[in-house]
Amino acid sequence: MDGPSRSCWLCGRRLGNRVEFHHPVPKSRGGRLTEAVHPICHRTLHATFSNSELGRIGADREALMENPDIARFLVWLANKDPDFHAPTAARKR
């Protein structure tokens, strides 16, 4: 990936000044590949899915986007600035 034109693996928006790296398959499940994401996208993934669920879904971004909570989040986030941040709700159990 090259500089400011990079985009977030989850939402597809241009990345801002803060970038985090998400393991689609968690390290605890043997994952090594990382994807660049916005901090808010990263926190939302981990608030929505357990590591076991992420391990089963893996790098299937489309499967993540089919989750109703993620789908609503992506619609809400679509027009926000790349450096937008807001508190993320706690994981639902």
Image (spheres, rainbow, N blue to C red):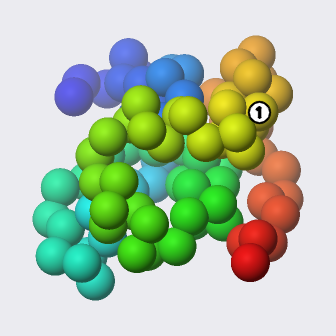
- Dot 1 lies on which element? helix
The spot of residue 35 in percent (x, y) is 31, 46
Residue 42 in view, yes or no: yes
The spot of residue 56 in percent (x, y) is 32, 62
The spot of residue 6 in percent (x, y) is 36, 24
Q: Nearer the viewer, residue 73 or 83?
A: 73
Asked which quadrant contains residue 80, the reply is top right
The three-letter code of the residue at mark 1 reads Arg
Q: Nearer the viewer, residue 4 or 80?
A: 80
Q: Quadrant of the N terminus?
A: top left
78, above or below 72, in the image: above
55, above or below 16, in the image: below
The spot of residue 31 in percent (x, y) is 19, 68
Please tell me which residue is depicted at 44% across the width and 66% down the height of the picture.
Answer: 53
Residue carrying label 1? 72
> Taking 54 as reference, is 75 left or right?
right
> Taking 59 as reference, is 36 left or right?
right
Please tell me which residue is depicted at 74% across the width and 78% down the height of the picture.
Answer: 93
Please tell me which residue is depicted at 42% across the width and 25% down the height of the picture.
Answer: 7
Please tell me which residue is depicted at 83% across the width and 63% down the height of the picture.
Answer: 89
